[in-house]
Image: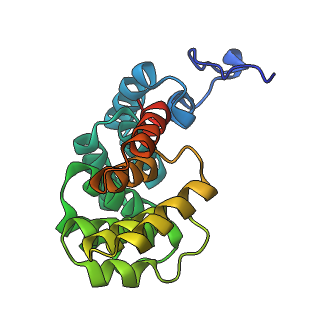
């Protein structure tokens, strides 16, 4: 069995040689290892040192996203883009954060001129929330073998009342990722709507187990 991930404080390996505190603070939040301690440390270092590299601001935005604070994630993405306008990784993170924050129109505007599978799935998600079903399907056309895309296509077909097609997409998402909480929940809702309660209960339990 692999050793559990280290969750403590990150410190320089050679403290006598010194270490750039921004990089040490980034290491504190990278991979979500110690967000409670790392976020204030990185934020304080950024606000005091005002680095001109947008990556530091983006790392803080990602840390806030992982902690569930979408408002702060949006703010620090905007700071990254202030330092370097057009910085694509920050635009991508901003779009995702705006969806979590419920600002779907701005998310779509942020993402629609970018490319890549994760961009297209987030863009489709924003369009679905806006009721722009045709645009959501268009965004998903180029994405292949992706459970998020299949789950969203299931939502597209559900919005069109094509429930048999929707079920196929939800099940395909679960073939690709057995612990996809949203796909389990969406499939459970669909099954419950046709009164297949035992199967619906099973998928609701799977959704809760995947994301309590």
Tell me residue 164's x, y (percent).
41, 71
In the image, residue 203 above or below residue 33:
below
Tell me residue 47's x, y (percent).
31, 35
Q: Quadrant of residue 19?
A: top right
Residue occupying image coordinates x 29% and y 70%: 110
Residue occupying image coordinates x 56% and y 63%: 172
Tell me residue 180's x, y (percent).
51, 48
Residue occupying image coordinates x 42% and y 40%: 198
Quadrant occupied by the C terminus: top left
Residue 155 visible in the shown view: yes
Q: Total marks drawn?
A: 0
Describe the colour scheme in one phrase. rainbow
Q: Nearer the viewer, residue 57 or 182?
A: 182
Left or right: residue 58 versus residue 19 is left
Q: Nearer the viewer, residue 149 or 78?
A: 149
Quadrant occupied by the N terminus: top right
């Amino acid at each position: 069995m692999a050793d559990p991930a280290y969750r403590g404080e990150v410190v320089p390996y050679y403290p006598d040689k010194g270490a750039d505190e921004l990089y040490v603070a980034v290491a504190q939040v990278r991979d979500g290892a110690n967000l409670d301690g790392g976020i204030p440390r990185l934020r304080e270092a950024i606000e005091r040192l005002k680095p001109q590299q947008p990556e530091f601001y983006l790392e803080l935005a990602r840390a806030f996203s992982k902690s569930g604070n979408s408002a702060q994630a949006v703010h620090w993405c905007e700071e990254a883009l202030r330092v370097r306008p057009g910085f694509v990784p920050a635009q991508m993170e901003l779009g995702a954060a705006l969806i979590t924050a419920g600002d779907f129109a701005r998310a779509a505007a942020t993402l629609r001129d970018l490319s890549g599978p994760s961009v297209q799935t987030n863009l489709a998600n924003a369009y679905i929330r806006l009721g722009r079903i045709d645009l959501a399907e268009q965004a998903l056309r180029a994405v292949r073998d992706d459970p998020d895309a299949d789950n969203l296509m299931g939502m597209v077909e559900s919005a069109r009342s094509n429930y048999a097609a929707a079920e196929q997409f939800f099940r395909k998402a679960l073939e690709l990722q057995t612990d996809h909480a949203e796909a389990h929940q969406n499939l459970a809702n669909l099954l419950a709507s046709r009164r297949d309660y035992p199967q619906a209960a099973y998928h609701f339990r799977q959704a809760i187990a995947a994301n309590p």
